[in-house]
Image (spheres, rainbow, N blue to C red):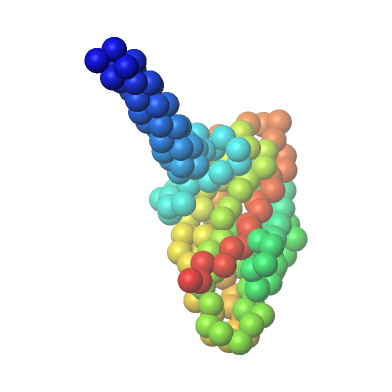
């Protein structure tokens, strides 16, 4: 009976260690979506909200902010993505529109999704996307090129020391 009792604590310890390992794996798996939500809400890390923002125009004609547009494609994604213009000089509080061009480089129909980021990260919450191709995925016919619309406004509350914002999109293949 003494031998049976000595194995019982070992088995409980093994179960506890296994449960701890499983809990750590689950926490690690959930950490990425939780971090994305945190970044979208706070603007931390340059992440911006993935939903449209209702805006009221109230331009500050005394101030100009340079908004630079950058684009990249995830490694292995068979697309091109490029801004129509490299930058715009904008007045905070005024609505602007620009476009990006994307192309499917392959024969099959594919789907892509853009993920935005704003630098400096602390200013991300002041960059409001009214209409953005990043809100939905885009489906491309073979070798199709699409013009993708972006409407945005830089909030008048942008700190005075920030005179340049960089909006960067990374394009990912979302096809199965």
Query: Which of the image's four quarters has the N terminus?
Result: top left
Q: Residue at x 48, y 47 (%)?
A: 49
Extreme-left residue of the structure: 1
Q: Nearer the viewer, residue 165 or 81?
A: 81
Task: Name the spot of residue 145 as percent of width and height, x first.
Answer: 62, 81
Q: Nearer the viewer, residue 110 or 41?
A: 110
Q: Residue at x 62, y 79 (%)?
A: 104
Taking the image as shown, residue 48 lies to the left or right of residue 104, namely left
Q: Nearer the viewer, residue 157 or 132?
A: 132
Extreme-right residue of the structure: 86
Task: Name the spot of residue 74 as percent of width and height, x first.
Answer: 66, 61
Q: Residue at x 63, y 45 (%)?
A: 118
Taking the image as shown, residue 54 lies to the left or right of residue 74, namely left
Taking the image as shown, residue 69 lies to the left or right of residue 172, namely right
Task: Name the spot of residue 56 as percent of width and height, x first.
Answer: 44, 48
Residue 126 visible in image = no
Q: Is residue 111 above or below residue 4?
A: below
Extreme-top residue of the structure: 2
Q: Residue 119's image quarter?
A: top right
Q: Residue 14's image quarter?
A: top left
Task: Name the spot of residue 43 as percent of width and height, x first.
Answer: 54, 37
Q: Is residue 120 above or below residue 111?
A: above
Q: Residue 77's image quarter?
A: bottom right
């Amino acid at each position: 009976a003494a031998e049976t009792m000595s194995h019982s604590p070992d088995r409980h310890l093994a179960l506890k260690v296994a449960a701890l390992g499983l809990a750590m794996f689950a926490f690690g798996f959930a950490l990425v979506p939780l971090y994305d939500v945190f970044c979208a809400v706070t603007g931390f890390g340059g992440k911006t909200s993935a939903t449209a923002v209702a805006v009221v125009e109230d331009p500050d004609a005394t101030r100009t902010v340079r908004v630079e547009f950058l684009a990249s494609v995830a490694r292995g994604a068979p697309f091109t993505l490029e801004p129509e213009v490299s930058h715009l000089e904008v007045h905070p509080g005024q609505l602007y529109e620009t476009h990006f061009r994307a192309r499917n480089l392959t024969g099959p129909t594919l789907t892509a999704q853009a993920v935005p980021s704003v630098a400096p990260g602390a200013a991300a919450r002041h960059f409001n996307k009214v209409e953005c191709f990043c809100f939905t995925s885009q489906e491309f016919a073979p070798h199709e090129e699409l013009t993708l619309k972006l409407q945005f406004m830089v909030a008048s509350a942008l700190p005075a020391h920030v005179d340049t914002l960089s909006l960067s999109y990374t394009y990912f293949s979302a096809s199965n």
